[in-house]
């Protein structure tokens, strides 16, 4: 019997299933939600992390790594895009967004973390095999191997134009901000190169979690008894949680007696509450109250004086958040759903009025890094009529001798001083109050009479505040 011919052996490596990495898959899913649904990472990431913990896939270190991968990638997106563009053979807009997300995650691991290069490339290629398939994983591998040939400083020297030739574009690439945002922040800040570089660098730092002890319901001393808690810098009600501190683990936060609130937001409420009045001090209004942080602090401060707070919010779901934040307030208050530009109250009804107006959010880029890539200069034109309308309504709502606080979480001059100047031209019966003496321990508040907070100078969001007294 003749011997059967042997089958030729297959050449090449045998197929290997891609290794699923729960941390990087979760980070990828968060980035896709930000890109596809215009979601915000600070809203998308917590439920994903909770689900992973509940499934037993994550521990605290995994959650910390996933958080760093998501936020680090979003903050440095502009820089990483410039580097990736130098490593691919097509315009970046022709790279599929999911592929670009995997590449960006890989570049952040290579250039923005201490993960060894070989591990960063290997983990990113495995992620690509799982979420993109083997074919595109080869593309990811080729690009990341090019990126791994140099460190961040070397890449910046290659892809950023020299400062002397184009200062704004240089800063935009090095510090990962759109050019128009760099220009706007520089105009608002003034000064030299050092100041703007410090500000842009601060926007790329992870912000601390800050709590507020709501007066009459909690004390700062109680919050300082928590693990990893230290006093705030400026507000007497502020407590900062060092890295790893979890607000949800704080009993006073769970009970609503304290809340998560940036110290800049607290200072705005305190300045309005401390502004001198002519006459009674019985009725306060928060005309744009959602989501409720300032309203809760104002309500507690009003309660200490026996004053009533009306909190108004146009969006019903945000009005619900305001009601939740004020639940248990020790003094009288009411939450209503109303449009601040079409007042549900009589003119001259209030002694103190706050309007924290909708804006581009350029003052909170530390917390919402994706906002810098979504906003466009033309967005300013969309906000301008609303901002002016809300300030006009606030001035009509306050009585003679009362005070209005115009606040916004943006340092852009078109959203701050330009709005105040335009509206006050139409209201000669008003005076600007110097807000700076009302925060005596806070340095570098600007030339006055309004004030501007900055991340790099105060460790807060870039909140703006103008205080206006009705004189006739």
Image (cartoon, rainbow, N blue to C red):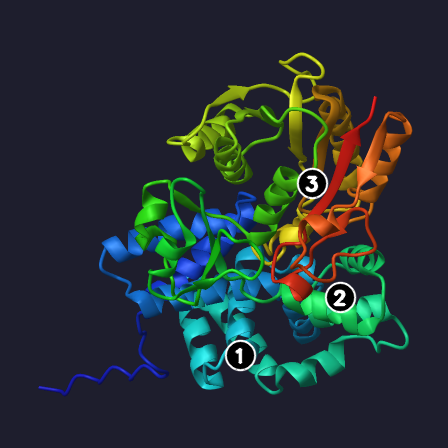
Mark 1: secondary structure:
helix
| Point 52% across, 53% down: residue | 236
Category of crowding for the residue at label 2, using alpha-carbon neighbours closer than 10 angstroms: few (below 14), some (14–19), many (at least 20): many
User: Mark 1 to mark 2: distance in Å?
Assistant: 21 Å
Q: Earlier in the sequence, mark 1 or mark 3?
A: 1
Q: Nearer the viewer, residue 20 or 470?
A: 470
Q: Position of residue 399 (x, y in %)?
A: 72, 21
Residue position marked by numbered label 1 in the rendering: 110
User: Mark 2 to mark 3: distance in Å?
Assistant: 27 Å
From the viewer's perspective, tell me whether residue 193 is left or right of residue 35: right
| Point 64% across, 66% down: residue | 202
Mark 2: secondary structure:
helix
Q: Is residue 26 visible?
A: yes
Mark 1 or mark 2, whichever is nearer to me: 2
Q: Quadrant of residue 126?
A: bottom left
Outermost residue, left side: 1
From the viewer's perspective, tell me whether residue 234 is left or right of residue 404: left
- Name the image quarter holding the N terminus: bottom left
Residue position marked by numbered label 3 in the rendering: 407
Mark 3: secondary structure:
strand
| Residue 183, placed above or below residue 309 | below
| Point 65% across, 33% down: residue | 354
| Residue 451, placed above or below residue 140 | above
Q: Earlier in the sequence, mark 2 or mark 3?
A: 2
Specify the label residue 96 is tagged with.
Answer: none
Q: Quadrant of residue 425?
A: top right
Specify the label residue 172 is tagged with.
Answer: 2
Mark 1 or mark 3, whichever is nearer to me: 3
Q: Position of residue 76 (x, y in %)?
A: 62, 66
């Amino acid at each position: 019997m003749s011997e059967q011919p042997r089958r030729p052996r297959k050449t090449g490596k045998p197929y290997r299933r891609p290794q699923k990495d729960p941390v990087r898959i979760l980070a990828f899913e968060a980035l896709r939600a930000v890109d596809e649904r215009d979601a915000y990472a600070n809203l998308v990431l917590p439920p994903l992390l909770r689900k992973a913990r509940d499934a037993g896939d994550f521990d605290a270190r995994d959650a910390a790594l996933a958080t760093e991968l998501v936020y680090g990638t979003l903050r440095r997106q502009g820089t990483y895009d410039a580097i990736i563009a130098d490593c691919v053979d097509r315009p970046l807009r022709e790279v599929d967004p999911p592929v670009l997300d995997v590449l960006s995650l890989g570049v952040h691991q290579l250039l923005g973390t201490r993960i060894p290069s070989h591990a960063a490339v290997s983990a990113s290629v495995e992620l690509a095999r799982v979420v993109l398939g083997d074919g595109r994983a080869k593309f990811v591998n080729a690009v990341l191997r090019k990126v791994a040939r140099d460190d961040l400083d070397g890449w910046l020297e290659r892809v950023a134009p020299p400062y002397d030739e184009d200062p704004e574009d240089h800063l935009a690439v090095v510090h990962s901000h759109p050019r128009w945002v760099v220009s706007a922040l520089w105009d608002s800040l003034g000064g030299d190169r050092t100041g703007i570089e410090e500000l842009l660098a601060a926007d790329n730092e992870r912000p601390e979690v800050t709590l507020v002890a709501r007066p009459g319901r909690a004390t700062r001393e109680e919050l300082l008894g928590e693990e990893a808690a230290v006093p705030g810098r400026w507000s007497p009600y502020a407590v900062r949680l060092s890295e790893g501190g979890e607000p949800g683990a704080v009993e006073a936060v769970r009970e609503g007696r304290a809340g998560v609130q940036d110290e800049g937001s607290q200072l705005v409420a305190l300045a309005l509450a401390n502004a001198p009045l002519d006459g009674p001090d019985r009725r306060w209004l928060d005309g744009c109250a959602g989501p409720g942080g300032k309203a809760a602090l104002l309500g507690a401060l009003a309660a200490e004086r026996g004053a009533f707070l009306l909190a108004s919010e146009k969006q019903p779901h945000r009005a619900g958040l305001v009601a939740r934040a004020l639940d248990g307030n020790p003094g009288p208050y009411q939450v209503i759903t109303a449009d601040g530009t079409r007042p549900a109250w009589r003119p001259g009804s209030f002694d103190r009025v706050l309007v924290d107006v909708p804006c581009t959010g350029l003052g909170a880029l530390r917390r919402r890094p994706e906002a810098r890539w979504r906003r466009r200069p033309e967005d300013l034109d969309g906000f301008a009529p609303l901002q002016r309308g809300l300030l006009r309504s606030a001035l009509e709502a306050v009585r003679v001798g009362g005070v209005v606080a115009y606040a916004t979480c943006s340092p852009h001059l078109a959203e701050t001083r330009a709005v105040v100047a335009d509206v006050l031209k139409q209201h000669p019966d008003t005076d600007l109050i110097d807000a700076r003496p009302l925060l005596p321990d806070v340095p570098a508040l600007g030339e006055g009479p309004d004030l501007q907070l900055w991340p790099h100078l105060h460790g807060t969001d870039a909140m703006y505040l103008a205080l206006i007294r009705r004189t006739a």
